[in-house]
Image (cartoon, rainbow, N blue to C red):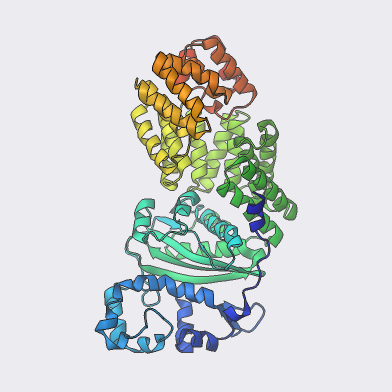
Amino acid sequence: MANETAKLQDHPTEPFSEGRLDSWKEIAAYMKCSERTVRRWEEEGLPVHRHPHKAKAAIYAYKAEIDAWWRDGHERLKQVQDLQQQSPTVAGRWWTRPRAMLGAALASVLASVALFAVLGGRLPWFQPGARNGPIRSIAVLPLANLSGDPSQEYFADGMTDELITELAQLNELRVISRTSVMRFKGTKTPLPQIGRELRVDIVVQGSVVRAGARVRISAQLLDAATDRHLWAKNYERDLNDVLGLQRELARAIAAEIKIKLTPRESARLQDPQPINPEGQTAYLKSRYFIHNQRTPEGARRAVEFSLQAVQSAPDWALAHSALADSYASAAFLTALPPNEAMPKAESAARMALHLDPDLSEAHTALGWVLANFYFDYAAGEREFKRAIELGPSRSDAHHGYADLLNGLGRADEAISEIKLARQLDPMSFYVSRDVGRILYDSKKYDEALEALRQAAEMNPSSGVVYNWMSWAYDKKGMTAQSVEMDLRNDGNRGASQEVLQELREAYRVSGERGYLKKHVELIKGDPYEQALYTARLGESEKALQLLRQACEEHSGWLEMLKVDPELDNLHPDPRFRELLHCIKLSP
């Protein structure tokens, strides 16, 4: 983890001078075409920079960015390779070395018409155009890091995340969540396939470069079904104004796809106050660890960087919201004791909302803390509903609200919310897993098993998903399948082969009851989970003791206490009703 942190450098070096072109003339010479052509291509997304505080003509460009811009279109030219033999005008090495004869080729009307016909108008610099039909859904694919420095991946990922967050505020637009789009980072999946898997109308593709104190984003809109280019533009600002850059880009996208903004949405997309670079960097690093290192150590690092962000920018609501999220994750991932972390998460969320009452992610974090630690379900529900109102495409808000509704026994509402979360984050293992869990708690065992199988395909190394599959098979009376899934759960969670063999032998010799007894003896874990095994054995006294311990320790699974089918046989016991009161629930 120390090595991971060391890779997240704060200050990237300026690109090598030999990689920079300092005038229109140099850019044109590099691309082997006229200055007029490259000036026109800037309107179509050619990455050209302007020096701050200098005359309009003082421009520069990086060879790496130009090459990447060209390659993005050049990938689409594979269909026309055969034209090299068919047309003398498009001969030689024009397509394999695009700059070598670009000017001559563009001068040839015959070649241009042929290319346009073959490519169906899909070259972005030949034909940007409108899309037929309204646009109601969008995915922001991971922005490419063109800095040439792998340690800046956290910055590119953070820029992707922030753009998604800005767009997720728009009521008329369904925005796919970060988890799902990150599945396509570094892949060459065809755009129409991505569109089908994410079920979106359009996608945003682009790149980000951080050079010294400047940040540049190049972005383009593409029709997800046809891969047709719709729009492209470059944005560049100082590092301390990167949030303003994101909001400018979000406004431009909304305008291009003709989304009608409400007055509140327009106000939210106005440029914020600049944030110092140190605070920005610490914030982005905290989000990197939250999203990419879902381990106890990763959660501790997220807390560390969030604290740095708050110290650097104490009036920045997003920094406090990130701190709240980091503390809550630290509790959930056992990095910190819940009794220590959760009050700090609440305090940070409330400070974020003091600074910005309309910050959706802070309402989400506060709702989670109130519902799962303080068991204040009414207040938690208000926070989740407000979070969804402010950010209708926030899958984490729908997910958290679904968990709350499920724990209260409001099954139909819970299923509806968790399915909304899945629509917004269709490739998230955690959302898909919890679709299965909520269906299981609702006693829809066949549907639960189907959802859990899909989640297991996303993450075969998970343990708990097989645990719930085991319980569902048990409720269907399929004991052999239940035991097999339970063994897979134990194996994925670190049980040795010797222990697994003992469990198999216990089942072979003594059946399900022998297996459960041996499991309680050999596998020690969360008291709530232990209670499920003892309840299944009919040992009510021990199960109730373990559940009492779970209440005292604020077990993360207590949210299921009222609805968990494995505990149904305890419901008539007055002591179980007392346990419900412990987490402020009525029978």
| Res 552 quadrant in image | top right
Residue 181 position, x and y percent, is 46, 53
Residue 56 position, x and y percent, is 60, 83
* Residue 578 seen in the figure: no
Residue at the location (70% across, 47% down)?
Answer: 304
- The correct choice, above or below, for 222 with respect to 28 in the image is above
Residue 198 position, x and y percent, is 39, 52
| Res 258 quadrant in image | bottom left
Residue 107 vs residue 207: left or right? left
Q: Nearer the viewer, residue 148 or 138?
A: 148
Residue at the location (36% across, 27% down)?
Answer: 445
Q: Furthest residue to the front?
A: 498
Residue at the location (50% across, 88% down)?
Answer: 29
Residue at the location (59% across, 15% down)?
Answer: 545
- The correct choice, above or below, for 43 with respect to 540 in the image is below
| Res 240 quadrant in image | bottom right
Residue 244 vs residue 403: left or right? right
Residue 447 position, x and y percent, is 35, 32
